[in-house]
Amino acid sequence: MILFSVYMLFISCTEQTNEDQESVYWVYQPQNHQDSWDQQAFILLSNYLNIQKSFSISDTSAIKTAVQNLLSTTDTIMAHSNGVDSLSQSVWMPGLQNFRTELEAFVLEQDTTQLKDQLKMCTVTLIHFLGDVGYKKTNIYVFQKMDEVNDWFWIGSDKTSKNPFDKKDRVEYNASFNLQKP
């Protein structure tokens, strides 16, 4: 059932693209910003970037450990989130739960060739979540590189980045988007 849900989410988050068209997977909602959310989201983001770093060195063990650490962090944040206001109930908690669900699907993935696709889904969900909560503590840059086989998609805190999924491609790419400036 989880795999079907992940598949359906993947299909709904993906657009048919070509080399001249880029996809946008989020809407930035600055009106939802709360400083306490920024602090917690910054911790999630830092842990998430560790996962991407592990991909860049192709260390499956480090990847799984980093994902487990992020799941633990997410659990802790969820356990201590006691927001009873409508914004917490309609934006923060559902977004955090969606991100957690994608991380769980990542952990369940046994096929190492599918890990990149699953991480892309985690990235899409995280960006969507950060946009929904109006994250603004740090700039989030979104990178997208399409080729004839793949739609590479990753995030970073700098305007330029190397593709963490393709060890042979050591080109510095300029960000395709800035989360806070749609």
Image (spheres, rainbow, N blue to C red):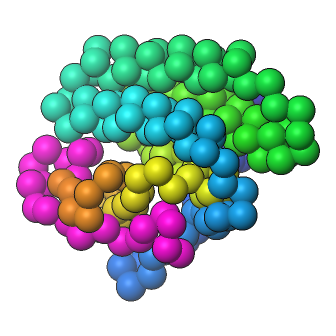
Where residue 122 appears, as percent x and y from the top left, is: 52, 40
**In which quadrant of the rendered view does residue 12 lie?**
bottom right
In the rendered structure, the answer to whether residue 154 lies left or right of residue 135 reads left
Give the answer, above or below, for where 98 lies relative to 169: above
Residue located at (31% from left, 31% from top) = 50
Residue located at (63% from left, 29% from top) = 100
Residue located at (56% from left, 53% from top) = 135
Q: Main secondary structure of the magenta part?
A: loop
Where residue 164 appears, as percent x and y from the top left, is: 24, 45
**In which quadrant of the rendered view does residue 61 lie?**
top left
- Decide if residue 152 is in sight here: yes
In the rendered structure, the answer to whether residue 124 lies left or right of residue 101 reads left
Q: Nearer the viewer, residue 82 or 112?
A: 82
Name of the residue lying farthest toward the front: 35
Residue located at (21% from left, 57% from top) = 161
Residue 124 drawn in magenta: no
- Decide if residue 108 is in sight here: no
Q: Nearer the viewer, residue 110 or 51?
A: 51
Span of residues in magenta: 163-182
Give the answer, above or below, for where 166 lies relative to 173: above
Residue 179 drawn in magenta: yes
